[in-house]
Amino acid sequence: MKVGSVETIRDRVLFRLREIPAAIKFEESIFALPFAYTGMILASEAWPSWIIFIWISLAMVGGRTLGMAANRLIDVKIDASNPRSNDRHLPRGVLKRIDMVVLIILGFALLMVSAAQLNRLALILAPVAAIYLICQPYFKRFTWMANPLLGWALAIAPSAAWIGVVGELSWEPVILSLSVAMWAGSFDIIYHAQDLDFHLKEKLHSVVSAIGISKAFVVARLMDVIAIVCLLVLGLIMSLNWPYFVGVLFAGLILLYKYKIVSPKDVSKLGIAFYRINAYVSSIVFIGTLIAVLI
């Protein structure tokens, strides 16, 4: 093989390595990771050993990589038709389908290896989580529940982290996961309000396309209220210290502010600032939990 050919292959590999994080929005891992760490800390009732922290982190990275790569691969034709998403890497040809297939395999392998290092129950349930993450993109094709069901894809994280620490599941992480499902599902309902015309045209299903933007916003607000109530109930059940409740209070205020940014009459600000709200909510709850457990 000529040197030029070797350099060309190397350049292509390096190019893909640079583009893949952006293609699967790796930076958005900050949305779910803090809630996973919240579940981990609550299960440990302290900061766990670093080895557990590392394996839980790697499992979450593997699961999210698997889920996002599957989403990009399964929805490539939809993304290509949608004006909002037709500049993504697969529709533009920047990356190829085989790249997503490789990511799915690597993400699944990382998830399974990490789960195996934690405990038996984590290993048994890891494939179940993987199947759900892979199936989730199909929901929009046949049910308006696609948005809440996406919320449950993120809600796996805190219960999975809890199981990773103690090797069993109880009501506490389920309540935390319910909160995450409501919070993430609410965000997804509002986010897809900008796709209403496209969904109606392509006969795709969402809460917004089923009941309209105004009613969908009411549902989203209700889900956010349920999310905060679940967090409060969890704090009371586990007798957590006051910093936890301060964190929940600030999270509630941020969710309230979310509806100052967007409304049924104006969804034009569904951009980076709106995305950051999710990161603020999960991070603040995590920080409040960490302080509450450590003091």
Image (spheres, rainbow, N blue to C red):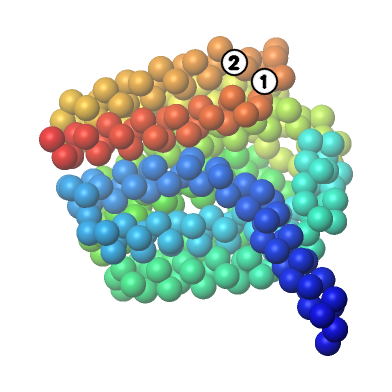
Q: Please tell me whether mark 2 sits on a helix, a strand or a loop.
A: helix
User: Is 142 situated above or below 232?
Assistant: below
Outermost residue to the bottom: 1
Residue 263 visible in the displayed image: yes
Q: Position of residue 176 (x, y in %)?
A: 34, 41
Residue at 17% from the left image edge and 47% from the top image edge: 45
Q: Closer to the camera, 53 or 80? A: 53
- Residue that appears at 70% across and 64% down: 14
Label 1: which secondary element: loop
Marks 1 and 2: CB-CB under 8 Å?
Answer: yes
Three-letter amino acid code of the residue under disc 2: Ile
Q: Which residue is mark 2?
A: 261
Task: Decide which of 128, 24 is in the foreground and name it.
Answer: 24
Badge 1 density bin: few <14, some 14–19, many ≥20, Cα 10 Å:
few
Q: Amino acid at mark 1?
A: Lys
Please tell me whether residue 104 is drawn above or below residue 47 in the rendered image. below
Mark before the other along the chain sequence, 1 or 2: 2
**Image x and y of residue 107, in percent:** 55, 66
**Which residue reaches farthest front?**
3
**x and y percent of residue 263 in the render?**
63, 15
In the rendered structure, the answer to whether residue 78 lies left or right of residue 207 reads right
Q: Nearer the viewer, residue 1 or 110?
A: 1
Report the label total.
2
Q: Is residue 251 above or below residue 110?
A: above
- The residue tagged 1 is 269
Q: Which mark is residue 11?
A: none
The Cα–Cα distance between marks 1 and 2, rounded to whole angstroms, is 7 Å
Residue 279: percent from the left, percent from the top? 48, 34
